[in-house]
Amino acid sequence: MRVYGATLDEETRCVHFSGDHDIVAILVPCCSRYYPCFRCHDEDADHRLERWPRSTWGEPAILCGACSATLTIATYLEVNRCPDCAAGFSPDLAMHAPHYFDAERTAVLATERPAMFATEREIERAAA
């Protein structure tokens, strides 16, 4: 699977997010390409990033950089590790979720999984 953007390695890390757990690429609906992050998309594309509406979360759109498994959005939002290979995903998902997924779900993440948020301020921003 081709991943676009400023990738650093085969596990989909990029110049913007290169931590041990930054190993997912997201299929963005506006151009049907996988990108490691919203910044990679913005630097590469000539349009704004389109978020996934709630009605499409059954679609396979998340690529695990460790094993190349493809997860549905719904599955990805519920797990901390890849169900296929057990590679850990970044705990910062909640902070970045508003870039990729509709605001309704971001607010739900803030209330259902507050441990994903580093501070109360981040919870308030995501829920807004």
Image (cartoon, rainbow, N blue to C red):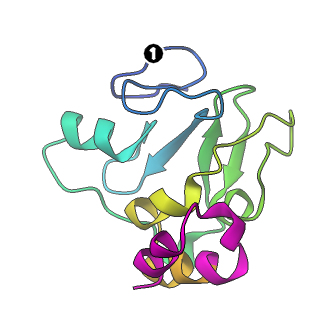
Q: Secondary structure at mark 1?
A: loop
Q: Quadrant of residue 74?
A: bottom right
Give coordinates of residue 20: x percent, y percent. 64, 27
Hey, which residue is sitting farthest left in the picture?
Answer: 46
Q: Residue at x 66, y 67 (%)?
A: 58
Q: Is residue 58 left or right of residue 84?
A: left
Q: Amino acid at mark 1?
A: Leu
- Quadrant where the C terminus sits is bottom left
Disc count in the image?
Answer: 1
Give coordinates of residue 114: x percent, y percent. 67, 73
Q: Residue at x 59, y 64 (%)?
A: 117
The magenta span reads 109-128
Residue 108 versus residue 26: which sits nearer the camera?
A: 108
Q: Within 10 angstroms of label 1, few (less than 14), some, or many (20 or more) residues?
A: some
Give coordinates of residue 24: x percent, y percent. 59, 38
Eyeballing the image, is 67 above or below 33? above
Residue 102 versus residue 96: which sits nearer the camera?
A: 96
Residue 113 belongs to magenta span: yes
Q: Main secondary structure of the magenta part?
A: helix
Q: For mark 1, what is the residue?
A: 8
Eyeballing the image, is 62 above or below 112? above
**Residue 54 shows in the view:** no
Eyeballing the image, is 99 above or below 14? below
Q: Residue at x 60, y 47 (%)?
A: 62
Q: Residue at x 75, y 26 (%)?
A: 67
